[in-house]
Amino acid sequence: MSDLSNIFEEMKNRFNSAAAAGLDVVFQYQIDDGEPYHVTVSEGSCVVAQGEHAEPSVTLSMDSETLQEVISGETDGMQAFMTGRIRADGDIMLATRLTALFPVT
């Protein structure tokens, strides 16, 4: 299992600011076997922080292995959602924007 901070740092490094135009959202990540993180996308910027956000736009729950597989491109996020490996609460349509916001290189 990769260190969660490294996974989220990789996400931040891949951030596509062009895909974030007009977005002001918070993605909360509840990691079943680790610490929670949240990613704030606002005004074309991306900020990653450990912990829970008071008012996330969408909450995504999964284990760290699933997160690593989605970030690496090994697993499709939508497929993981459809098979129950990722659970979502809130504005789940925002989750469909993650691939454009954090493209696999």
Image (cartoon, rainbow, N blue to C red):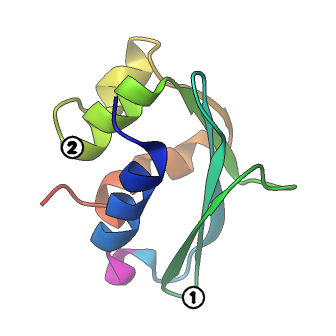
Please tell me which residue lies in front, 57 or 66.
66
**Magenta: predominant secondary structure element?**
helix
Q: Is residue 27 magenta?
A: no
Q: Which residue is label 1 attached to?
A: 43
Amino acid type indicated by mark 2 = Ser
Count of number-bearing discs: 2
Name the residue rendered at 75%, 53% in the picture.
Answer: 56
Magenta region, residue range: 15-19
- Please, is residue 56 above or below residue 21 in the view? above
Q: Position of residue 85 (x, y in %)?
A: 44, 16
Quarter of the C terminus within the rendering: bottom left
Which quadrant of the view contains residue 54? bottom right
Q: Residue furthest bottom?
A: 43
Q: Position of residue 47 (x, y in %)?
A: 57, 74
Between disc 2 and disc 1, the foreground one is 2
Please tell me which residue lies in front, 1 or 68.
1
Q: Secondary structure at mark 1?
A: loop
Q: Which residue is label 2 attached to?
A: 72
